[in-house]
Amino acid sequence: MMLASSSFAVSKIIYDSGNRRDPFIPLTEEDSTSVSVSSSGVKLEGIIYDPGARSMAILNGKTYQAGEAVGDATVVKILKDHVVILVDGEEKMLWIREEEKT
């Protein structure tokens, strides 16, 4: 049996940012305080805001909309800078940036 040798040309992919930020580089560090965690263990990692009521929150690595359950919590509403969840009958706010709490 004869094996044919073949060579593959490996091309290098170069990302042209066009003076924009590279979307594959995180905006925050892993240990940043910009991720909010509730006492129930629900971690807010991001918000996809849509004023037309189709906003989504990235909680514990998955996307959720208002009304959906996240473990023992329920997403009440999603705003530009924070998410309101209901845990054991109490509303709690998870902020995308800790410094924006008022």
Image: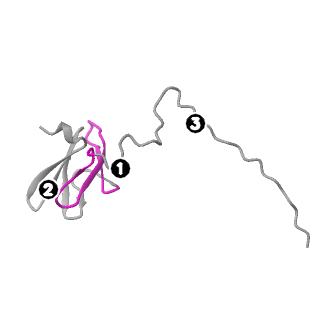
Determine the residue positioned at 62% across, 37% down.
14
Determine the residue positioned at 81% across, 53% down.
7
Which residue occupies the foreground of this view, 53 or 34?
34
Residue carrying label 2: 86
Which callout, 3 or 1, points at the residue further toward the start of the chain?
3
Front: mark 2 or 3? 3
Residue carrying label 3: 15
Is residue 37 rendered magenta in the image?
yes
Front: mark 3 or 1? 1
Circles 3 and 1: CB atoms closer than 8 Å? no
Amino acid type for the residue under numbered disc 1: Glu
Residue carrying label 1: 30
Tell me where the magenta segment starts and ends, as one range: 33-61
**Going by the image, does 85 lie left or right of 58?**
left
Secondary structure of residue under mark 3: loop
Give x and y (percent) for residue 86. Answer: 14, 56
